[in-house]
Image (spheres, grey):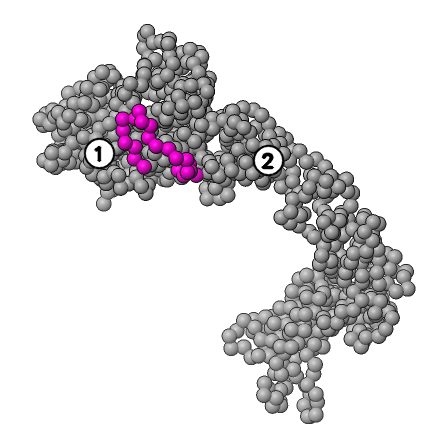
Amino acid sequence: MLDADGTEQVHPAVLVPVADAVRLLSRARRTADAHPAAAFWGAATVLALQLVARGRMLPGLSPGDHDAWRAGPLDAADVERVRALADAMPGEARAMPTGGGALLPEAAPLIRAFLDAVADTMPRTAAAPRGGLAGAFAATDPHRLPELRSWSDRIAADVDTGVRISLRLETHDIEHAPFRAIVQVHSLADPSAVIDADTLWTGTDPRFGERARLDVLLALRRAARVWPALEPLLNAGVPDRVVVGDDDLGALLGAATARLAAAGVEVHWPRDLVRDLTARAVVGAHDGPPGDLRAFLGGDTPLGFDWQLALGEQVLTAAEMHALAESHRPVVRLRDRWVLVDPALIAKARNRSIKPLTPIEALTAALTGGIEVAGKRIEVGTSAWLDELRERLADPDGGAEPIAAPKALAATLRDYQLRGLRWLDRMTSLGLGGCLADDMGLGKTVTLIALHLHRRAAALDGADPAGPAPTLVVCPASLLGNWQREIERFAPGTPVRRFHGTGRTLDDLVDGFVLTTYGTMRLDRARLADVPWGLVVADEAQHVKNHTSGTAKALRTIPAQARIALTGTPVENRLSELWAILDWTTPGLLGGLAAFRRRWVKPVEADRDGPTAERLGRLIAPFLLRRRKSDPGIAPELPAKTETDQPVSLTREQAGLYEAAVREAMAGLRESTGMARRGHIIGLLTGLKQICNHPAQYLKEPEPRLDGRSGKLELLDELLDTILAEDGSVLVFTQYVTMARLLAKHLDGRGIGNQLLHGGTAPTRRDALVARFQDGAVPVFLLSLKAAGTGLNLTRADHVVHYDRWWNPAVEEQATDRAYRIGQTRPVQVHRFIAEGTIEDRIAAMLRDKRALADSVLTGGEAALTELSDTELANLVELRSSR
């Protein structure tokens, strides 16, 4: 053999069976220090095994008439790989007899012989006789079969040739047959050798052998089996070209091209053939912009929803669409070019109109870029005026509408409040509703009052022919007084009345504000529905997040020019709550609840950061203005807030009660199912939280001793000592009135001034307590979380203590915002008490997860704790060491 430098080296030969060589070489090619010859033949082994795996094996006879398998037929890619291997073969990989004078063997024949040897080895296994294949082409020892020579030669001529063919389509007769197929001949030995079949028949080309014509005919015979349009060539004197009719062209545009490729025949389309005819659904293409957008968006005038076809970026005219619809050909002539046409596009040209859309459906399509038709989403385009409306609405916090605070407003609006007023005016002037979902304390009330005054001034200036209209505010009973005081403070002289209690009336109502509660609204919805309201405002709109409740249903019956929802928590637990609010403010925007869940909720739950979530965000953004205290432009206007989790250890008494409660409850759960089991779990969770607060609360002791029995109470005493020494004030929230009373008793015993507000506190007493605390009469305000979580302005406090944790972080944050809101001039410290090693530790982690879902507005809810398995529940409630 020859070394790399051409020096002849003599080595003894060792004969190895091909089957063994395959195993050796496949391992050798992966060895870093493998000899170049071994590495090369290892690469050839991989190619051989890949051909066998693809079924590229042909039966035949050796020159000595023995049965033999060989690799083939090889397609163009296979031939190219063989050529690349041959070009890369090192001298060391070629052995020749000693004696000198011999020429270096050619690489390609050696590689082909090796591929054939590997192919012949694979079927000849020890398992072949057991499968009944002990005869020719399967037995380990070859059989001599001279009688099969004719058959073997015919197989070789039919599939293992030296050429392949392809079809080149050219334009032909525009009216009758637009194309003709030209047969091209390719040399497998030299891929650069390509000629037309007529050249091969009428002349000679040294690059093609004597069998080339026969091989072309055999290849055409195979191709005609899958595309019958080629059959005329089989009897032609010169099989060079064939006219392609519409039906044959349709087949070629379908599955025939793939079948031809499988038979080794490529199809080359003309370069000037256009394939970029596309269709898109367009909303409002034939509808001009309405004269009155508010009347249009509030009405039910349908908009056209049609298919629009385009050639590249050029939209087809109506005449071209008609011509396409009348065409029954797979290729048409459009704008001096041949265009391939998908049958589905012709169907859309024939049936251009899909269905009319309501104005709100059209707006939804414009905002999301698509719409659902027959359960499937399709991409849509919109007319120019809809595009302008979309751009106008797309940025809730933007817009260039000049607007200033109304002259009648006795307040100076901050910049973000002015932007909120601009957004509210934009939406309501279009007859659209919206949800102002600012954090608590950012001034939603004063912004809404400013909106009413702005709309009234515009009506008096003639912008609204109907003139000024009253605003109805529906809110919890605890906020009636706050709303009245705020209106009287910021809009002095504006009529305001309470529609609540006995003697309520709407007589002589012309303008101004009407304040009512959700309960009264539910009872008197018929009277309220008779008033032509300019605005209906739902404050703390999370109260109607359950769309099936009587309150939510009653609210929907009250008509208005526009509806506004005010809430600090647009999504507390699940997206259906957001649907309920926005479906009230802008009916039809999100579709029905079932469709909303199918189209939006399920895909969002499956992939929160996917395209569906992004589209939902685009749809919701114009109708939901959400600002947080931490947002740029807002944070500098507020003092800092520091939140701290304060871990506390259980006392020995608490730990004993905790473990006993868990043990007893888990034993009882094994015997209960259904609602009974859920009730047991709720009872267990409530009991454990009460134990963490104080044993006296859990044991319901009538005259309890409080000192020294609760880690939380000890921590509260330490905090109060520091806060009061610094002349601070503190809000202490608990979800249990019983615990609040225990704390009041304890503080009274220590001589610390305090007061208690809970759900049973009368409205007049409530207002007096707020004023007393704000005036600094008492430093500690004990509050029931459910009763005092909204509607109170307690900026006197610079510390907030959450003595126990609520299941929902949004409610907890609302309570904190009683102190951390506009008007606060000092930093606020928030202290959350958490009993170490208990359920409160695990609930704290769950609250963090839940808060992330609410902030992203992409939550589909969380598994109810009552649905946990026994094992999961045990892991949640077990008492763990704090060390």
Q: Is 721 rendered above or below residue 81?
A: above
Q: Earlier in the sequence, mark 1 or mark 2?
A: 2
Quadrant of the rendered image containing residue 258 = bottom right
Which stretch appears magenta?
A: 395-415
Question: As drawn, is 621 to the left or to the right of 196?
Answer: left
Whole-angstrom CA distance, mark 1 to mark 2, is 50 Å
- The extreme top residue here reads 503
Question: As drawn, is 756 to the left or to the right of 363?
Answer: left
Label 1: how many Cα within 10 Å (few below 14, some 14–19, many 20+): many
Quadrant of the rendered image containing residue 772 = top left
Q: Foreground residue, 330 or 322?
A: 322
Q: Is 289 rendered above or below residue 211?
A: above
Q: Foreground residue, 174 or 804?
A: 174
Quadrant of the rendered image containing residue 492 = top left
Identified at 68% across, 85% down, the residue is: 104
Q: Residue 462, image x and y in percent?
A: 43, 22
Q: Residue 351, image x and y in percent?
A: 70, 35
Q: What element carries label 2?
A: strand
Return the residue at label 2: 283
